[in-house]
Amino acid sequence: MRNVTKDNITDVFLSYFGPDTDPRMLQVMGSLARHLHGFAREVNLTHAEWMQGIQFLERMTEFTDKERHEFILLSDVLGLSSLVDMLNSVPDGTSSSVMGPFHIADAPDIPFGFDMKRHYEGEVLLAHGVVRDPDGAPIEGAELDIWQTAPNGLYSSQDEEQDTYSFHGIQTTGADGRYGFTTVKPVSYEVPTDGPVGDILRATGRHAWRPSHLHYIATAPGFRPLVTEIFPDDDPYLDEDTVFGVRSDLVMKYQPQAAGSFPDGYALSGQVSGPYLMADFDLTLVRAE
Ligand code: BEZ
Ligand code: FE
């Protein structure tokens, strides 16, 4: 086509696809082109703005490496990660939520009752619950990959003071499906703003805060993996999470507990000396097709 115009360029683009193009590729790329061209038409994109966009993407690549996933962060603050998550969620299970960029593969195995808090200062939180199937039966052999920030609001990969696997661990459930560990009460924190994503937040008058949370990935043979987070109901940022990760079934109350009183099955007197908080949260996994 030599007579390309601003009105027919989208159709011309679509006509360039080869006859053997995978149908899903055709659908996704076709829709992307329609929306991208439609966006440029709608805002009447100028050369300067187009160049600003290109330079933004170039800066994104400069900031991205094995540990700094600036593109995931961009997707998170644009709401795309959460939208994709919700489009692919299934009923009958615990809601999924964003994984974020700070998960570490191959975290160490931790036993039931493990003290993730170690020497760190902060309010003690006993997080526990049962991993269940959709009928409510406990799942034996479920793996729960757990991670959170230290009390300074930083994940281990952001903080030279922490060991690689500080506040990261994987626990496997027994026949009762139960998981349980002590830690420090998670804090609200800001997502990194020293890169191009921070520029977008500032340019649009947004803050970078996430409500405090514990991250979980629950996996078990025969079940869909669940990537999720749990949030306390009194966090000031619950209704304005900058990455849109909060779902109502993931919000729970931390229950204050008296010193020396522990739930059945927990021998915590050595690791919890005073009053503490308890997060009791069951996770329901959905069967894989
Ligand atoms: C997190 O919760 O770790 C996170 C999620 C999205 C962006 C940044 C951090
Ligand atoms: Fe997080």
Image: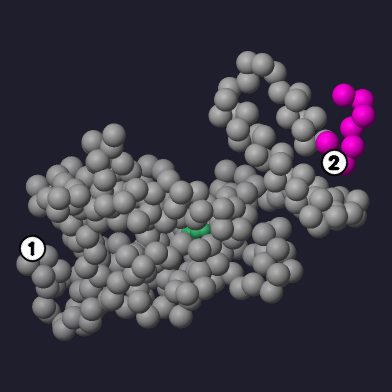
Q: Secondary structure at mark 1?
A: loop
- Magenta segment's dominant SS is loop
Q: Horizontally, is 44 left or right of 125 in the view? A: right
Give the mark, 1 or 2, whose residue is nearer the N terminus: 2
Image label count: 2
Q: Secondary structure at mark 2?
A: loop
Q: CA distance from mark 1 to mark 2?
A: 69 Å
Amino acid at circle 2: Asp
Identify the mark at residue 7; answer none if there is no mark. Answer: 2
For the point 34% across and 48% down, which residue is it? 90
Q: Nearer the viewer, residue 206 or 176?
A: 206
Q: Horizontally, is 59 left or right of 64 in the view? A: right
Residue 49 image-quadrant placement: bottom right
* Residue 208, percent from left and from top: 59, 69
* Image quarter in which the C terminus is found: top left
Which one is closest to the eye, mark 1 or mark 2? 2
Q: Which residues are magenta?
A: 1-8
In this view, 215 is above or below 274 = above
For the point 44% across and 74% down, which residue is it? 238
State whether label 1 is within 8 Å of ligand 2: no
**Which residue is the site of mark 1?**
265
Q: Residue furthest left?
A: 264
Residue 97 seen in render: yes
* Residue 66, percent from left and from top: 57, 43
153 is within the stretch colored magenta = no
Residue 53 seen in render: no
